[in-house]
Image: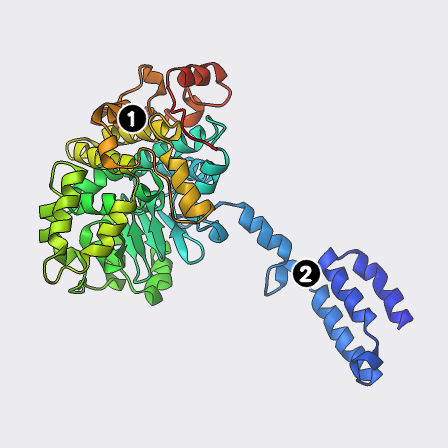
Amino acid sequence: MFFCYARSTKFASNRTSSDRAILILCFSIMPQDCGIPFTMYYFKLRIAMAIISIPSSTTMFPMPQQVLRQNREVVMAEEIGRARMLTLNRPNHLNYISGKVASTLGHNFEKYENDDSADFVIIKGTGRTFSAGGDLHMFYEERNTRDSCLEATYRMYWLCYHIHTYKKPHIALVHGMSVGGGASLMAPMKFSVVTEKAFSSTPETNIGFHPDCGFSYMLPRLPGRLGEYLGLTGEKLRGKEVVAAGLATHFVPSQKLFQLEKRLLSIKSGDEDTIRSVINEFSTNIHIDERSILNKLSIINECFSKDSVEEIIESFEAESSRKGNDWIMPVLKSLKKASPTALKITLRSIREGRTQTISECLRKEFRISMNIQRTIISGDFYEGIRAQIIDKDKSPKWNPSTLDKVHDDQLDLIFKPFEDHDLELQIPIKEEEEEEESRWRGKYENSSYSSPNQVNIQKAFRSMPSCESVLV
């Protein structure tokens, strides 16, 4: 055995620490320990050494170093023929969207729009989730560093504008969760494909926030008052419901999704009719279950068309007592547990969004989000994250605690445009500006919020008052 060990030492010195660990384990077990003849032990040892000696690039399974290297790429970008594939690659973190993710996506979308060899873009998520939205842990951990999340917020809104106004076909392949900001990478796409495992929601009011990233534009354009219902309650739409509601374009059974992806990657042009035809080959007709919320639109339209959140809840409660309306009670319970401030912000934002352009909605939402993060009138955002994500006690202590304590003059502070125009989200407002090549210039690096521009950041902070009641 010493002879074998001596011969293998030089061999082992060129391997990874994982390989050496396996060799040491092999040599540390003597034949008598295994209860087998020496010849059989030697034979099995040679097999083990042969397996280890195969170059890592040719192994059937990636070595740990390769796995880690892949995981460090939060977004994987691939160029395949005329297609460009973007894959959200944080599966162990529900493909949360951090500032780095938003930055990488924005960079690639801009690159592909200006690349004549790229005809269309596909986006998907690794693992069982498309995307769970913004990285709430990041916001909470840096809550006392008041400028810490400005970059992530700015980059995400800037990205959303360009997804809404993209000049080439883009396709979302959604299998699993598509929530909050994650849904903003699905709903605006020219083609958005969901499976029976997909579900989508805007649950922001449960953490003291508001449906953003363009949802104040998209929600009021859903059938009837469905947008107000989804935005205020955070209820989920599943699979075919997402398509029937208008937040996705196609339903494809999960067992066909991989084949669809392969067919899309083989397309030789970015012709929209060609792409649509390919997706139609795999998609199925939509038949909504009779219990679906989409079959309750008459009640939703009646209740969620009221002028205020208080009136909506009162009307919804009245409907809950009628026969066949048992589905209302759990929804009503969830609605009453949401942040009063967030509910009022959300209703006002969605109502305003009915007559606003996507650019106007995004600029408005950006202001709201910035002011919420800076706790202008309430610290509910951080309290909601604490209760739902950090401590998970599910018992947030909202401040103000009731709807009647949230006044219109407080909401005005949240919605008010910044006095300094440079602090607004720098995206084109008029349609003619959207056609110009300069529409990509408003990126974070060129904004007043850019990290090197500390003077402007300090000016921004001085212009924003803050709530004194929160952040522990």
Q: Residue 21 in the image: x percent, y percent?
A: 75, 62
Residue at figure coordinates x 37%, y 19% from the top left: 465
User: Measured along the vertical axis of the image, is residue 326 above or below residue 218?
Assistant: below
User: Measured along the vertical axis of the image, is residue 283 above or below residue 462?
Assistant: below
Q: CA distance from mark 1 to mark 2?
A: 59 Å
User: Measured along the vertical axis of the image, is residue 117 above or below residue 365?
Assistant: below
Q: Which mark is residue 71?
A: none
Q: Residue 142 in the image: x percent, y percent?
A: 49, 33
> Would you name the residue on which mark 2 appears?
55
> Would you name the residue on which mark 1 appears?
414
* Type of amino acid under label 1: Ile
Q: Residue 4 in the image: x percent, y percent?
A: 87, 70
| 352 horizontally vs 46: left or right | left
* Residue ranking furthest to the right: 2
* Type of amino acid under label 2: Pro
Residue at figure coordinates x 20%, y 31% from the top left: 357
Q: Earlier in the sequence, mark 1 or mark 2?
A: 2
